[in-house]
Image (cartoon, rainbow, N blue to C red):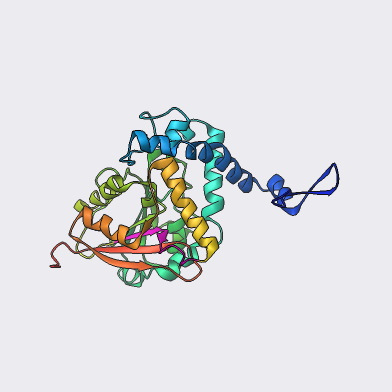
Amino acid sequence: MTNKIFQEPKPGVIMHTAASKLLVEDQALQSWVGFNTEDIYPGSAHVLDAIKKHPEATSLTRTGFNFAFNTTDREPVFVTIGKDAKRAQRMAQAMSSLTGGEGYELSYLSEGCDLKEVDAVGGTLVDIGGSHGFVSVHLANVYRNIEFVVQDLPSTIESAPKPACADWRVAKRINFQAHDFFTEQCVQGADVYFFRWIIHNYSTPYAVQILKNLIPALKPGARIIINDHCLREPGTENPWDERLMRSMDLVMMTLLNAQERSEGEFRQLFKMASDGFVFKGVTRPKGCRMSIIEAVWKPDEVR
């Protein structure tokens, strides 16, 4: 009632508000609240325990979440939650409610990421960790000639809709492929290698390895595009965006020993992976919370 979720119109009488009614009726919101209170919050209470015992704070299995649920050195959060179908569904709905909300629309991606040259030559974009291909479907509707390869783990690819969408002209240019991005990239010579909501899930050693695994497949001029939050200096965002993005940074630490990154930290990731990556910078469309971080593979360029 203090937070205006319920109301007390007269002593001893408790009534709904529009906010509490929404909690009852909106399944995605229920999932978001449940995921926070039952999975993230217990983990957050043990982040300091995890850091004190493992101060390097990079392992996927030595997180606050692992300490909270007694899975330290056994399995990462996704495996633990994946063992319980209801819990897994709740997490998926919670993430969907966040990433599908205001400030995360895919229209910002197509607005801020210019793929006209790739489209002109009928090039290929590899959507790495692309789940069921919703990003590729969106881009395929914008660009009529680009071929798309959506990569994810076998279980995800098996459950993906085939065709990817009802429009056959779009669906025929989208192919699904089972691939683990911790192994060497198997699509040789693509024009773009794309990551959305992937790199922020991993601490620096893992993120650098993901980028290194691209190298054997890269042709000169290949673009590597990351679509993630990119943190600005504290106090430079509007307060609501600042809260959401900094909170996500803490959630990444709690669950995965991972993080949201600044432009300098993204630049450093590419530098650590190889001097052949030329960092091109960060673009953030107005109104969007996510940024487009790009590097180009130019192994022979002298810098």
Q: Tell me which residue sits at (27%, 52%) in the image.
A: 211
Q: Nearer the viewer, residue 103 or 266?
A: 266
Determine the residue located farthest toward the right in the rendered image: 10
> Is 231 one of the magenta-colored residues?
yes
Image-quadrant location for residue 263: bottom left
Q: Is residue 249 visible?
A: yes
Place of residue 191 in the rendered image (x, y in percent of width and height, measured from the top left): 28, 62
Q: Quadrant of the C terminus?
A: bottom left
Q: What residue is rendered at 18% in x and 60% in y?
A: 276
Side (left or right) of 258 relative to 141: left
Image spot of residue 128 (x, y percent): 35, 51
Q: Which image quarter: residue 295?
A: bottom left
Residue 79: give x, y in percent of width and height: 43, 34
| Residue 104 visible in image | no
Question: Would residue 52 appear left or right of 97 to someone viewing this image?
Answer: left
Residue drawn where x is 39% and y is 30% of the image: 72
Residue 204: percent from the left, percent from the top? 30, 48
Image check: 39 left or right of 276?
A: right
Rendered view: 154 above or below 288? above
Is 219 placed above or below 54 here? Answer: below
Does the segment drawn in magenta span residue 204? no
Q: Nearer the viewer, residue 280 or 113?
A: 280
Q: Nearer the viewer, residue 284 or 131?
A: 284
Question: Which stretch did the figure color magenta?
Answer: 224-237
